[in-house]
Structure formats: C-alpha cells, structure tokens
Image (cartoon, rainbow, N blue to C red):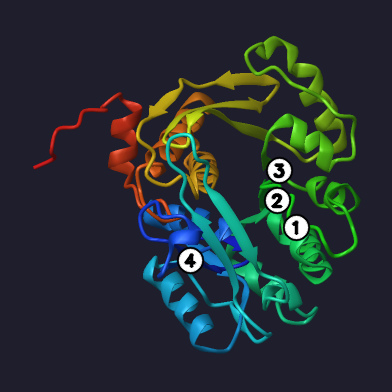
C-alpha cells in the first residue's frame, strides 16, 4: 500500500486542567500534535499507510514528539532532527459564553529553520500516492514556505495527488510576505482544498466576498472563479460551523466536485469536550473517502460525522474507529452504554 505523506510542524500543547483559565493555572497538561499529523493519525487509525515529514530538535522534547508519532503508528522514516526548539502552544479551554484561547510560542522552532537539503522529497515520495500540507506551514517562515512549495512541485511531477487544509492563522505570516504572495502558486497545483470561500479568495489575492452558504445556488460563480485560478483543483469541501456557545456547536459541510454542489446534514454537539483538531478530523474524512472511492455525499457525511465525533474527545487527535463514525452517520446518537 502506498503512503499518504504530510509535511508540517509537530508541537507541544500545554493546557490548564479542566476549564481553568491561564491566570488560575499552577500546572499544565501536556500533549503533542500538529494539524497535518492529526490528519495522518486518523487515516492510520482507519487502516491507511501514512508518513509524517517534519524537523524536530535533537533533545528530549523532540524525542518525545517522535515517540508520540510512533504511538499512533504514523511513519516517521523521514523526520529530521536539528534546529533550536520545539514549537509550543498554550490552550485555555472555553466553556459556555467564554471562548477558548490559544497562545503560540513557536518562533525559531526547528521546522521554521528547515534547510534546503534536509529532506530528500524524491525519496520521500518514492512509495507514496498522496501529499498533504496545510496553510499553517508556509506561514511559519520563509524556509518552511520554500520547502512546502518544493514538496508540492516534486509531488506533482511524480504524479501524487495533493491536498491542502487552508487553516489560516492570522498570528502567523510575520516573516515578510503575506499569504496572497505565497499561496497562489502552491494552491495552483493542489487537487483538494479544504477551506471556506471567503478565506480562499483572500489567500488567492482576490476581492473580498461574503458567500451565503444558506443559498447554495448563489455560490457557483465563486467556485468557478477559484477553478480558474487553481486548474488542478478537483474537490473543494468546506466545514460549516454554527456556534451557539463554546460548549454548544453544530457542524455541517458542503463540497463542490465535478461541477456539483453537495451538502450534508448538520450534527449537533452538546456539550463540546474539546474543539481543537476537529477541522483536521474533517480533512482526514475527505482524504479517506477519496481513497476508498466513496460517492461524494458519503464522503461529505463521513467527514462531518468524524469532525462532530472529535468534539467529544480531549486532545487534538481523533481516535474514533470506522465503526463509531458509521454509527454516527446512521443516526446512532444514543447515550446507552456499549457493553
């Protein structure tokens, strides 16, 4: 089985216990994650072969991160060690009317300092069929942006499918260029892009738009314009989130594929345990569905169910089984104990 490869940053997550605020915390719970790795962990859980490519410091924290990657059975054959440090992010979990808060401490991380000869992408892709990246990585540094573009160009040349989760982070892009100066070239050779239309227009340097997802018939003109800018694009899914509060969310999805617009049912989650990683779970659902040649409505329903179910788990990584996800798709929302 050929592998799904992803490139990105692995980070340490530090969270106050429960729903304590940063100001109240005397200790932090530690876990390790990263947008691209989170997606691979789901795919590996569902029986697909995966490889994560990153750069980690050659110290105890870097070694612990590699241990966590192995824990989820994701391949680490092409991970490079070196650089200064591991990126960190702090998460304060929201509740009810109080939103969650994230503080990043990732400047000069190992992957931000990746060197041009660190990764042999031809070797990485020699037994791969798919390459996944996210909009986070090019925003970290000029070096990470260069490497992401390089990887995509080689993946395209070698015939791999390429997917992207836009994952726009306004706190990134401090290295001198804006997204619309970097991303159009990479998005232009990508086959699957997960993101909302307004953000994608912004990343492509286009005019500001306000799409109304409640009126799908008005969206085609926007999709057509994106396809003109991204000639290799085949699938454009979007997560639709309706936030009643930090503890009460509704999740749906919409996808443009083969000139058709597909919509899903909306799943309600109350209470939310942990919202982090739910978009990564959605992305994993899209990649899995395309790998298994599911029909388009089933791909979207599977992705929505996966994302919804991830809201019930602590941590960034979705550990739901296929059986659990298909039960949610079939409407099994009972609270009965499984014995």
- Return the disc, 3 or 2, that comes first in the chain's sequence: 2
Are circles 2 and 4 on residues that touch, CB within 8 Å? Answer: no
As drawn, 58 above or below 131: below
Q: Nearer the viewer, mark 3 or mark 4?
A: 4
Q: Secondary structure at mark 1?
A: loop
Would residue 54 appear left or right of 72 to someone viewing this image? right
Which quadrant of the rendered structure holds the C terminus?
Answer: top left
Cα separation between marks 3 and 1: 24 Å
Query: What's the mark number on residue 77?
Result: none
Task: Specify few, some or many for label 2: CA neighbours under 10 Å numbering under 14, 14-19, or 20 or more.
Answer: few
Task: Specify few, some or many for label 3: CA neighbours under 10 Å numbering under 14, 14-19, or 20 or more.
Answer: some
Q: Nearer the viewer, mark 3 or mark 1?
A: 1
Cα separation between marks 2 and 4: 19 Å
Cα separation between marks 3 and 4: 34 Å
Q: Residue placed at 90% from the left, 58% from the top? A: 177
Q: Nearer the viewer, residue 223 or 307?
A: 307
As drawn, 34 above or below 202: below
């Amino acid at each position: 089985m050929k592998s799904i490869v992803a490139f990105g940053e692995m980070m340490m997550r530090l969270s106050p216990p429960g729903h304590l605020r940063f100001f109240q915390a005397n200790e932090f719970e530690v876990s390790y994650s990263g947008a691209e790795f989170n997606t691979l962990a789901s795919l590996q859980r569902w029986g697909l072969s995966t490889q994560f490519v990153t750069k980690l410091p050659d110290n105890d924290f870097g070694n612990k991160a590699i241990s966590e990657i192995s824990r989820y059975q994701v391949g680490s054959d092409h991970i490079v060690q070196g650089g200064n440090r591991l990126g960190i992010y702090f998460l304060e979990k929201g509740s009810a009317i109080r939103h969650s808060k994230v503080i990043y401490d990732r400047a000069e991380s190992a992957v931000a300092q990746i060197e041009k000869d660190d990764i042999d992408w031809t070797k990485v892709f020699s037994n791969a069929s798919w390459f996944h990246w996210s909009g986070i990585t090019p925003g970290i540094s000029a070096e990470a942006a260069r490497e992401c573009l390089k990887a995509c160009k080689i993946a395209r040349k070698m015939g791999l499918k390429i997917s992207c989760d836009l994952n726009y982070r306004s706190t990134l892009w401090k290295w001198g260029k804006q997204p619309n100066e970097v991303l159009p070239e990479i998005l232009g050779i990508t086959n699957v892009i997960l993101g909302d239309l307004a953000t994608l227009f912004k990343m492509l340097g286009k005019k500001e738009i306000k799409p109304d997802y409640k009126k799908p018939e008005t969206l085609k003109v926007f999709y057509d314009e994106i396809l003109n800018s991204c000639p290799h694009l085949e699938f454009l899914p979007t997560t639709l989130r309706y936030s009643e509060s930090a503890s009460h969310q509704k999740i749906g999805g919409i996808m443009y594929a083969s000139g058709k617009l597909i919509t899903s049912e909306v799943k309600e989650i109350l209470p939310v345990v942990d919202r982090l990683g739910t978009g990564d779970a959605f992305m994993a659902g899209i990649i899995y569905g395309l790998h298994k040649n599911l029909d388009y409505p089933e791909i979207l329903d599977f992705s929505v169910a996966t994302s919804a179910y991830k809201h019930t788990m602590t941590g960034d990584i979705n550990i739901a089984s296929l059986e659990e996800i298909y039960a949610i798709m079939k409407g099994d929302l009972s609270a009965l104990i499984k014995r």
